[in-house]
Image: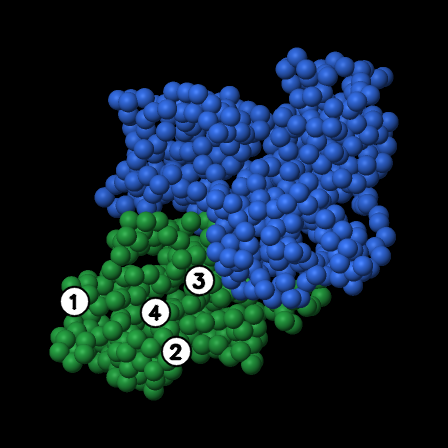
Chain colours: A blue, B green
Amino acid sequence: MIKIGGIRVPMREEPVQKRIKNFRSVPLGYTKKEAVAEAQRCILCMNAPCVVHCPVRMDVLGMVRKIAERYFKEAFLKIKEDNPIPAVAGRVCPQETQCECVCPLGQTGDGNGINIGKLEAFVADWAMENGVKEEFRIEERPEKVAVIGSGPSGISCAVDLRKFGYRVTVFEALHMAGGVLRYGIPAFRLPRNILDYEISTLTERGVQIKINRIVGQNVEFRDLRQEFDAIFIGTGAGAPRFMKIEGERLKGVYSANEFLIRINLMKAYDFPEYDTPIVCGERVGVIGAGNVTMDAARCALRLGAKDVHILYRRTKKESPARDEEIQHALEEGIVLHELINPTRLLGDENGWVKEVNLIRMKLGEPDSSGRPRPIPIEGSEFTMKLDTVVEAIGTEPNRLFLDRTPELETTRWGTIKVDEDLMSNIEGVFAGGDAITGGATVILALGDGRRAAKSIHEYISRRKE
Amino acid sequence: MGHFEGRRGDRVKHTIVRKETLSAENYLIEVTAPLVAEKYQPGQFVIIRLHGKGERVPLTVADVNSKKGTIVLVFQVVGKTTKELSTFQVGDTVIDCVGPLGNPSEIRKFGRVICVGGGTGVACLYPVIRALADAGNEVISIIGARTESSLLLEDEIRKISAEIYISTDDGSKGRHGLVTDVLEELIKKYKKSGGIDRVITIGPPVMMKAVADLTRPPGIRTIASLNTIVVDGSGMCGSCRVFVNGEMKLVCVSGPEFDAHKVHFEDVISRLTMFEEKEAQAMAYYEGKDTL
């Protein structure tokens, strides 16, 4: 029976008490029946705002319609046209600010819009389980393109370049491909088998991935320029930002990057079966309130922390994290402290962090980010006992590559300058993703990768004429 | 540029082609790593991972053979990973060997340079000494170890140094004492005859701190190569952060060499112990499993 409108088919989730002890996926995914029921709620708007508002213009409406008709394969092929890694995007996109929020069924703000993210993940998972793949014929071209970085923008650029027929080599600095999807996003949000599968579809198509290659360090950028007809830079924003307050030298203080790399890339949660250690105390403070903050906080809980505190200088309303992540974190017992800011970290006699000085904040006029500026309230200082502190206040483009490539023009924020075709100041060298935005979303990076692939194709074709 | 070629999906094989036991706790292995061998310059390091469950550990490059595409690594057994690596034999492979990482040493003609090395730092210092000697410097080497049998590369260093001094903690070889005892005397000795143009020190941070404390009053330019805990080695994790003149620097991006007089060594020493307990746990787990 088709039921248009109505309330969302609830997503089954791993129960809180169980999930805080492991790194398995929290959402359990829709069954076929649930997915169909959810899709059948769609009222099939003529103007499809969900498509219009998607940064890669993925045919959301087409996908939902096909799922409603139980044509899962067609639904999958529809989304694959615009999104090379739907199983990932379905799980990490901020749907509530992109597509689900413009769904007429969710206009009242009750979170009742079509559950697009979960349907996307459902369809992608279904295709993976049933061996359904997007088929395209590749007409080989002789030109070679280098892609620097195997994160979201690099992946989407590489896939599209392959579709055009170019010989594509991806250079990855770490020992595994995936970029931020690999080192940044925990398995309980993005299971590793799904990430591995999405990346394997690249290599199956003939994209060559070279790991342990750090361009600017052990691979020269000028060598790449000689060997390749075009280059795409998708180096992301992988350098940690520190608050630059006293006490960051103490033991027990991590950047979110270090904390998450140890866990996600190195599997420190399986220590000592895996060699990489992590020290996580009982009272953990995570500074910030973005997705990375939520990830680090939830990881700390899973490592056995008793109390996990998020320390945020604004309020929950201003948090850039996905609603689902905040909700999951709070359900799991993580405390979100609003309007406080650390001013100093204090250590014990052995050099371990033991407490943090904080100051209360109030919200002022909007700042350059459009969010109200947090202002310290004088005389409101207090301390909190913590034995682990994770700084998750954002990242910035890695200087390692940029400093050694001075010919590449950057902005004063350290992002690479590009024109509307995503070409940098160097001819044939393109860039996209966090490397040009300074830190945004997976889906925007995917969009950039696609746009850059198109520009590279035009550039190479133009040059051949 | 052959290393851009190769079949898709393939990993470079890092095979051990030579292995030597240098002492009870020090080993030397020669590993195939063509990219590192091609690009390596003195002062740089590599990160290796033994297998799929391995951690990323920074290791010292003592030599390279760019023709053969191999590198020589010297390591001391200090924890689980180095213990396990010491059991690897010729023909075995390690899954990853990435590098060279960090910045090369500044090599030019300085004049009289004293190179002070301790422990496995001596192995790291060796290519630096050679490059300095090749650049026309008068290199005086001071190398130290706990005991005679753990002294590294003595003959090799003797060959390329203008002078060599040895010290051991137990007096079993050379001077009974610390490398800094020798350094102190040399500073006095050369005070009148043209002085010392540069000191380079690689070894345990406590030793490098002592070296810096000796050369600070006479104002001898001193460079220390820091061996912090490193995870990715490419500026991503911030684990290797050190404070130089009060400013936060990453060893893997701005180092590993820094002005020793400006490094806050207390933090370097303290932060190295962050995972001590875990390291002991890993070792116990490994040894327990080993006997199964």
Q: Whole-percent x and y of residue B117?
A: 30, 72
Image height of A77 relative to B138, above or below: above
Label 4: chain letter: B
Residue at the disc numbered 3: B102
- Same chain for mark 2 and mark 3? The answer is yes
Residue A172 seen in this snapshot: yes
Image height of B108 relative to A437, above or below: below
Identify the mark nearer the N-term, 1 or 2.
Answer: 2
Real-space CA distance between mark 1 and mark 4, rounded to the nearest whole angstrom: 24 Å
> Label 4: few (<14), some or many (≥20) within 10 Å?
many
* Circle 1 SS class: loop
Considering every residue shown, the one lying at the far front of the view is A465
Foreground residue among B206 and A367: A367
Foreground residue among B236 and A399: A399
Q: Which amino acid type is shown beneath numbered disc 4?
A: Gly
Real-space CA distance between mark 1 and mark 2, rounded to the nearest whole angstrom: 26 Å
Q: Which mark is residue A181?
A: none
Identify the mark nearer the N-term, 1 or 4.
Answer: 4
The answer to whether marks 1 and 2 mark residues whose Cβ atoms lie closer than 8 Å is: no
Which is closer to the viewer, label 1 or label 4?
1
Identify the mark nearer the N-term, 3 or 1.
Answer: 3
Residue at the disc numbered 2: B131
Q: Whole-percent x and y of residue B249?
A: 37, 52
Q: Which mark is residue B218?
A: 1
Which is closer to the viewer, label 3 or label 1?
1
The answer to whether marks 1 and 4 mark residues whose Cβ atoms lie closer than 8 Å is: no
Residue at the disc numbered 4: B121
